Amino acid sequence: MIARSALALPLLVAAGGCGRGCERDRPYVPYAIEPDGGVPALPVDGAAGAAPEDAGAGLLAPPAASQWTLEGRTIHAPPGHVFGRALPGDFDGDGAVDIVVTARIPSEKLLAKVLYHPGKGPPVELVGRDDRELPDASCTPVERLSPLGKTGVLADVGSVCAGHARVALPRSITLVALDKATPRHRFAAKIGDLDLPLWVAASTADRDRDGVEDLTLRFALEEPKEEGASDAGRPELVIAFLDRPAGLTRDPETPEESLRAFAKELDLRSTKGKISQTVPDGADAMRQLYRAVCPDAGAPRVRPSVGAFTCGTSASLDAAELAVVRSFALHGEPLRAVQAWERMGRAPLLRSKERLAEAEKLLDQVAPVKPGRLVKAIVAEPDPMGPAPAYGPLAFDAKGLLVLSRGAVVRVDARNEEIPTKIPPWSLVASTPDGSRLLEAYDPCDGTFLHLTFGDGTATRDAELPIAPAFGVPCAAKGQEQKTTLLGTSPRGLELLVAGLPVSAPWGGGKGEWISGRGIGASPPGSARSPQGRYYAAVTARGVIVRGDRNVTVRAPEIANAAFCTADDEGRRIACLRDGRAVLVEF
């Protein structure tokens, strides 16, 4: 068994592509190494803005050294460069001392080069100049050179920057074999635009037992617990590359075999009462990990330049989503169950008819389907809602349905007649107590979470929602807009549906929360929630879900693909907008 080493170096790295005032900081754990012979655990200082001494990362050069004597050899840095770290050894087996070393230009905010000084022959550049600049002078180099296998060296080059936990910090990892006259790049990748922890480990065990070292990479969203501790709640994605004459070839059993093990764990948890609440978090971690590593998901953060790969379709991601559907269904959360059901049909998942049928049965239990009957196609033309998040032109009250039409309010009474009223028209604008407006819900396209933006014309502020972006659907542009339906206000802020899911967002920005049940807020006219807050209507791909004291899924031709719906307090009628017209449906 390969010994676990404590050579992972924690950094605070930020995400690129947010660009909208995101303020969330997350710890970023870079590269870990698992040498085949095992390395004793070493203490690591992970303070942001510092580059700690790490005995497992190679020898640290003297300050500003452009000339360095190691093992009786004197080497010189390229013009204008200074050395960072070095790893001496006889890598090619010729009896002479070889040295792998990092070097950078102090005045430039770029990653270091990695050079190889063989015992016999001129130096060779293993990793060249990186054109991705670091943010500012607070950035400190973090470079690691470690032996891997019999003749391999792993170079991990990056930085840590004080106060820049939200900025994309470039980083590169390169595995080079030095057993021949010309070094062989076995794997090389750039990592960036990442706003989630990513732990990576490498080993070169002979996986297929052909006498040649293979390469196995292990990815996780957090560092493993110490040896012997349970990692049941921690998904891993393991990709193995078999060394063939033509180069590294992905073992087709990977990464599916590692994902399969975690999906089985989620399946077991989904039927165990309270513990099944951990299933959504586990599945979300599994998706984030797949998205960060695999190009199949459309926006990978690990971008190989040597040893490029795909992960292939995954039945295990499908199985994990079924576990999420079951978990939410058992806990009476139909909207979140429907979202998991929708994900089951998206690439790169392997769509399973059997699992989809099982998910449908679970949805029928938590929100049974009821046919709707058209009561009235309303003549009055509703006011348009506009492109920004807004309240709707439909609202129920104790006497029937109100329609905001051409700036006036029309009532559909108990006899289903349309009668003009003197009720003041309501505003469709969603405003905060301080006068700011809800401007948009968007996906920052960084693979993390959706956001809301509030603004007053001079400044904006963001609220981060607990909603992960659509999986298997590439983000078309940074700041991609998301569908929003307003429910109302509460002491917590604004309650609404974003991408079909119920959340609350604080007025001042910050962290949003999930809403369970029907919510607790007030229901302004034009919200999707009934006047007394007993029910709300949500348009889904499965039908209009009416959520409240009881949950039902309403289906009728007249409300298929509706743009907005609202519910009455009895949970018996909904009014919807479709193609710019309003309809009243009972069920």
Image: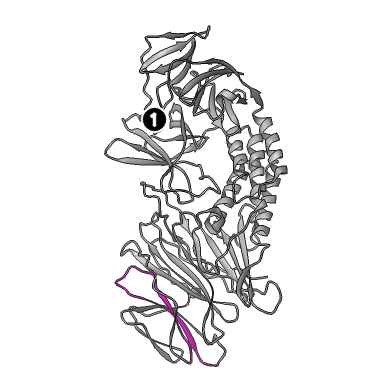
Give me the residue at 42% from left, 52% from top: 25
Relative height, residue 24 to residue 82 (above, below): above
Relative height, residue 193 to residue 188 (above, below): above
Q: For mark 1, does the 10 Å Cα neighbourhood hold few (<14), some (14 to 19), or many (20 or more) residues?
A: few
Camera-nearest residue between 587 and 171: 587
Give me the residue at 62% from left, 50% from top: 349
Q: Is residue 100 magenta?
A: yes
Q: Is residue 528 magenta?
A: no
Work out which quarter of the rendered image holds the N terminus and state it.
bottom right
Relative height, residue 218 to residue 449 (above, below): below
Q: Which residue was labeled with disc 1? A: 386
- On the image, the x and y values in percent for residue 239 come to 61, 64
Which portion, as a residue range, is magenta? 95-119
Relative to 178, 3 lies left or right: right
Mark 1 residue type: Gly
Relative height, residue 229 to residue 556 (above, below): below
- On the image, the x and y values in percent for residue 271 come to 70, 41
